[in-house]
Image (cartoon, rainbow, N blue to C red):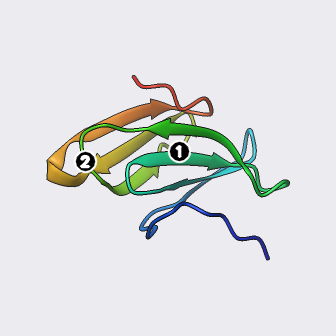
Amino acid sequence: VRQFATGSDVRSVAFLARPRGLVAHGKDAVFLFDPESGGPGRTADLAGGAVRCLAADPAGDRLVVGLAGGSIASLSLPDLTPG
C-alpha cells in the first residue's frame, strides 16, 4: 500500500494510463504522482482559490479543476501546463 502526501484533504483523484500516474490535489496545487516510486512527478500551483474537485478527460490529455469561488482551471496532461 502506498501513501501519497498532498498536505490537505483530497476530494478527487484521476488515474492515467499513459504515462501511468495518479493525479490528486492539495489545497491550491495539483500533483501527478508516479505510482512506481510513490513520489510526485510534477506539481502545478494554482491561483484562484482552493481546489474543490478535478476530472480528467477520457483520452487522458486534459485535466479540468474546479476551484473555490466557481473558477475553473484547465491543465494539459501529463505535463500539467495551463491552457
Percent of width and height locating residue 18: 73, 39
Furthest toward the left, the residue is 69
Residue found 57% across the figure and 33% down from its top: 77
Residue that badge 2 annotates: 49
Q: Secondary structure at mark 2?
A: loop
* Closest to the observer, 65 or 47: 47
Q: Secondary structure at mark 1?
A: loop
Q: CA distance from mark 1 to mark 2?
A: 26 Å
- Look at label 1 and name its amino acid: Pro
Neighbour class for label 2 at 10 Å: few (<14), some, many (≥20)? some
Image position of 8 with respect to 22: above or below: below
Residue 7: numbered disc: none
Give the foreground label among 1 and 2. Answer: 2
Image position of 19 with respect to 33: above or below: above
State the quadrant of the N terminus.
Answer: bottom right
Residue found 16% across the figure and 48% down from its top: 70
Percent of width and height locating residue 67: 27, 49
Furthest toward the right, the residue is 36
